[in-house]
Amino acid sequence: MSEQSPADALRTLAPLIGTWKVEGPGHHGTVSYEWFEDGAFVVQRVELVSDGETSRGVEYIGVDADTGMLRSHYFSNTGKILEYTYQLAGRTLTIWFGGTDSPAKFVGEFDAGHTVNTGAWQWPGGGYESTMTRVG
């Protein structure tokens, strides 16, 4: 059995491509995912309001050449640079803060049409529910 190519690995995120309304207790906003030139990366643009504070950022998701994992760098309007690991297996989207050994992660399930994802961010001692609904 051959390993998945980097392009094929990145294409597993195709159900995310589009614009999404994000809602949950204490937060709301919009995120969008799009292909970067020639499908080399997936780019996420974020505008969220959480507890009255607006945060904006852009995230570049690509394939880590050493591990084959979908890794990202998120650049926030506050100057922070954060790293995440993505996996979309079946209808389950998992986003770890850092690597797959991190206890801080989002786990959400898509509906059959990939138009709604319902899940929660969780970490030791906390977390919150969040729902994404495709709007474009």
Image (cartoon, rainbow, N blue to C red):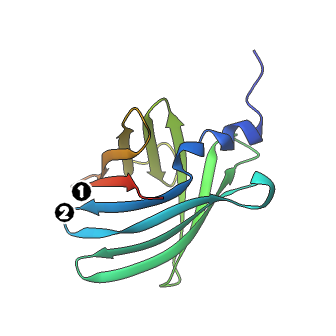
Residue at 68 percent of width and 38 percent of height: 9
Relative to 106, say whether 26 is above or below. below
Q: Position of residue 17 (x, y in %)?
A: 57, 52
Residue at 76 percent of width and 42 percent of height: 7
Q: Amino acid at mark 1?
A: Tyr
Q: Is residue 67 left or right of residue 93?
A: right
Work out how far the residue at label 1 is from the one at label 2, CA to CA, in angstroms: 7 Å
Q: Position of residue 30 (x, y in %)?
A: 41, 68
Camera-side residue: 21 or 128? 21
Q: Look at the numbered discs 1 and 2 and tell me whether their residues touch, using CB distance below 8 Å.
A: yes
Residue at 67 percent of width and 44 percent of height: 10
| Quadrant of image for the N terminus | top right
Quarter of the view holding residue 35:
bottom right
Q: Amino acid at mark 2?
A: Pro
Residue underneath mark 1? 128
Q: Position of residue 59 (x, y in %)?
A: 58, 66
Residue underneath mark 2? 25
* Camera-side mark, 1 or 2: 2
Q: Position of residue 14 (x, y in %)?
A: 60, 44
